Image (cartoon, helix red, strand yellow):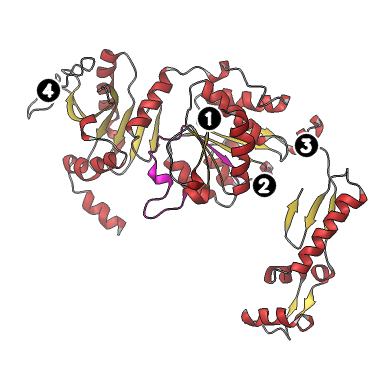
Amino acid sequence: MESDLDNILALINEHKTRKKLIDPVLKQYDWYKQYIKEEVNSIKSDFVGKQFSYFEGSYQKDVDRFIDYVLLDEGNNVLAIIESKRYSKDEKSGRIQARTYAKDIEKQVNRKIPIFLTNGKKWRLIDEEGIEREISGPFSQEDLKRRNDLFHKLVDPKDVEINNTIVDRPRSVQVVRKLSEHFSDGHRKALVHMATGTGKTRVAMGIIDLLMKANMIQNVLFLADRTALVDQAKTTGFQEFFTEPVEDLREGFSTSGRLFVCTVQSMMSGNPRKLYERYSPGFFDLIVFDEAHRSIYDKQRLIGNYFDSIKIGLTATPREHESKNTYEMFDCENENPTVEYSYEDALRDGVLVPHTAEIIETEVLSLGIKGKKLSNKLKDELRRQEIDPESADFSGSEFDRIFMDDKTNELIIWEFMYLSLCQNHLKCFKFQIKALNSIFS
């Protein structure tokens, strides 16, 4: 069906591409007609005086140049231009024209102008620094204005002092400094590997604080797939180290404030438009992905590709166990994280201490059980799953997958309490709890 639609759209000219495809997208991102000027003469217009000259049916070759779209702020100052091509043409083919138009404007207003390139299907951005990249769509008027203001107040993040009330451990300070240098060099993605317990949340808050002071970012989203991680970022992260209120998008759509938290699941909710699709692609200047290695990679990537933001992934997964997809998502070369603070390094620094494992298991989980020895209640549960209890023979792991056995779980919890409190309350254990197939620390 999509290929049929592509074939139909391939027949439309540039004018129809604008009216059928580009104009509706601009409307979707809250652009009002009065702030969109079309067919503007980049030579004869007075962009300082805000007097625009338009195409009137004829032009002088090599004298007149016409911009497809000029996007204005509420004071009629130029925010950006759009160079459009017909659907069947490569959107990048308008690059040289657009740069020429932008220079015409920049000579008058004495500031850099971002450029959008599109054929109605694909969009590209050439930002104020001349860096070109693919984006999912145009930015709203408000987002363009905010980003333009940030660009003209930008300072080198390498020159910004790290807030030692947020990060005070030497290695955490080093991680934040490496990230500041990484973004100073023009990178827009980073993957941070730090062992559990070494302070990933504080490092995230530290780099957010630094990039805000550098005027590189303003709107920040902390995204995770687990509610506990989002709660932690909200309470022991943003609320502890920043004075602004935190917008929790699990409670619904909001564009007020600068600091936002949400779960991946909440961002993907909504019908027909997902929550994340209600924002302009330029709304978030930075997205922090906590537990970037987890199984919701595809959803994270979808959200990450939608927003034109700086992206930082946080993971505690050792590099040898990290997914190749995760490295690709954050543009890591040779499957190396951007910055790393491993478990072994943390041990040497005295930040972490070695642990020993205590394995807790029951006879059933160790040796398994035959179906005919089960209680009548469990036998009935098997029958509901179309399993004959009289002939069934389960290994311990199979038993755990089929049944939620409260007595087994209760036994493990009591054993956990005994080991933790009765034997030596000062000792910290790592438990491999086979009944739950989880690690508790």
Looking at marks 2 and 1 on the same chain, the residue that comes earlier in the sequence is marked by 1
Mark 2 = which residue? Answer: 321
Q: Nearer the viewer, residue 134 or 264?
A: 264
- Amino acid type, label 1: Glu
Mark 1 = which residue? Answer: 244
Looking at marks 1 and 4 on the same chain, the residue that comes earlier in the sequence is marked by 4
**Residue 75 vertical placement versus 367 (above, below):** above
Badge 2 crowding class, 10 Å Cα cut-off, few under 14, some 14 to 19, many 20 or more, is few
What residue do we see at 79% from left, 73% from top?
Answer: 368
**Would residue 233 be seen by someone viewing this image from the given angle?**
yes
Looking at marks 2 and 3 on the same chain, the residue that comes earlier in the sequence is marked by 2
Looking at marks 1 and 3 on the same chain, the residue that comes earlier in the sequence is marked by 1
Q: Quadrant of residue 172?
A: top right
Judged from the image, the secondary structure of the residue bearing numbered disc 2 is helix
Residue stretch rendered in magenta on the structure: 268-293
Judged from the image, the secondary structure of the residue bearing numbered disc 4 is loop
Gap between marks 2 and 3 measured at Cα: 15 Å
Q: Give residue 344's mark.
A: 3
Residue 274 covered by magenta stretch: yes
9 horizontally vs 247: left or right:
left
What residue do we see at 40% from left, 33% from top?
Answer: 133
**Which mark's residue is nearer the viewer, 1 or 4?**
1
